Image: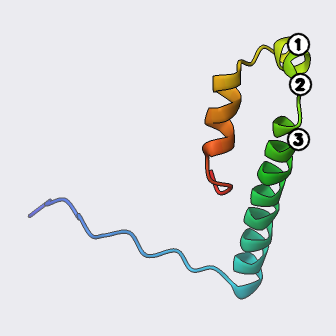
């Protein structure tokens, strides 16, 4: 009897329209939250940056990142 391994590819996942809309809504919310917190970070003064342990270069690096990351 031949006992070869079955190496078929996994079936692609299917999402309902509601699931896709929920995921899109959640991703949009995360992007908006990142943009909001980066705007707030841009407003911090030197003392506030020091209090949270960030340097100007740390802030600049974070502000240069795109909103989707």
Cα separation between marks 3 and 2: 11 Å
| SS of the residue under disc 2 | loop
Cα separation between marks 2 and 1: 10 Å
State left or right for residue 34 relative to residue 48.
left
What numbered label is drawn on residue 45? Answer: 2
Residue at the disc numbered 1: 51
CB of mark 1 within 8 Å of CB of mark 3? no
State left or right for residue 7 relative to residue 37.
left
Residue at the disc numbered 3: 40
CB of mark 3 within 8 Å of CB of mark 2? no
Q: Mark 2 Cα within 10 Å, few/some/many (few <14, many 20+)?
A: few
Q: Earlier in the sequence, mark 1 or mark 3?
A: 3
Task: Residue at 19%, 59% (x, y): give it.
Answer: 5
What numbered label is drawn on residue 25? Answer: none
Task: Residue at 62%, 50% (x, y): give it.
Answer: 69
Q: Residue furthest left?
A: 1
Q: Position of residue 20 (x, y in %)?
A: 69, 78
Q: Mark 3 Cα within 10 Å, few/some/many (few <14, many 20+)?
A: few
Is 48 placed above or below 41 here? above
CB of mark 2 within 8 Å of CB of mark 1? no
Task: Residue at 90%, 19% (x, y): give it.
Answer: 48
Discs 3/2, front: 2
Viewer can see residue 1: no
Q: Quadrant of the N terminus?
A: bottom left
**Residue 45: quarter of image:** top right
Q: Position of residue 10 (x, y in %)?
A: 38, 69
| SS of the residue under disc 1 | helix
**Residue 21: quarter of image:** bottom right
Q: Earlier in the sequence, mark 3 or mark 2?
A: 3
Is 68 placed above or below 64 here? below
């Amino acid at each position: 009897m031949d006992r070869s391994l079955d190496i078929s590819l996994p079936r692609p996942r299917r999402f309902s329209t509601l699931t896709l809309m929920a995921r899109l809504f959640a991703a949009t919310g995360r992007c908006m939250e990142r943009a909001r917190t980066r705007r707030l970070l841009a407003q911090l003064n030197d003392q506030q940056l020091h209090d949270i342990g960030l340097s100007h270069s740390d802030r600049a690096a974070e502000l240069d990142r795109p909103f989707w990351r």
